[in-house]
Amino acid sequence: MIRNIEFDNLMKDLFHHFGLSYSPGSIQKVQPVSAAVPPLFVAFVPLDEQYAAFVANIPFSLNASVQPDWFLERNSLLKQTVVNYCLVKGDNGQPQVMAQCRFFYAGQTLSDVIEVYEAFNQEIALCHTELCELI
C-alpha cells in the first residue's frame, strides 16, 4: 500500500471531523447519511501521490436481481459523477455491489475532502435505495 503523509494527515483530519479515530489503512464502519441504509465498511485508500479512493460494499438484499443495465446507467456520465460501481462475487458466492470514489487529494483542504466524502455518502444512500427497489 502506498504511504503518503499528506493523505494520512487529510484522513486523520476527516476522521476527527466525524469523531472517529484514524490509523493508516483504516477500514471504518460508518453510518451513511440515510438512516435507511445500514452501516457499511468504507476503506480509505491512497492510490498514488495525487489520487485516493473511498471504497465501500453496498448492502442490499441477496434476492435482488441486479441487471447490467443498472450498472451502465449508474456509471454513465449523465447519471452520476462521484462514484463508479461494479458487481463482484463475495466470499459466500453471493453478488455484492462495490462502489469506488476516486478523487484528487494533493493540495486539497479538509473542507474539499469533506465535500467529496459527503457526496460519496449521499450517492451510496441513493444507490442502496435503487438496489432495494429492484427486488
Image: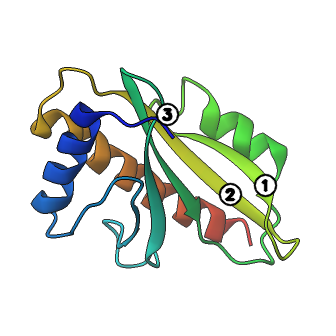
Disc 2/disc 3 C-alpha distance (Å): 16 Å
Disc 1 packing (10 Å; few <14; some 14–19; many ≥20): few
Q: CA distance from mark 3 to mark 1?
A: 20 Å
Q: Pointer 2 and pointer 1: residues touching (CB < 8 Å)? A: yes
The three-letter amino acid code for the residue at tag 3 is: Gln
Classify residue 74 as left or right of residue 5.
Answer: right
SS at circle 3? loop
Dot label at residue 88: 1
Q: Quadrant of residue 105?
A: top left
Residue found at x 74% / y 73%:
135
Number of residues whose C-alpha sits closer than 10 Å to that of mark 3, classed few (under 14), some (14–19) or many (20 or more): few
Which residue type does callout 2 highlight?
Answer: Val
Residue 93 location, quadrant: bottom right
SS type, badge 1: strand
Q: Position of residue 61 (x, y in %)?
A: 70, 78
Q: Which comes sooner in the sequence, label 3 or label 1? A: 3
The image shows residue 83, relative to residue 96, as above or below, that is: above
At x 11% / y 58%, what residue is drawn? 17
Give how far apart the Cα atoms at labels 2 and 1 are.
6 Å
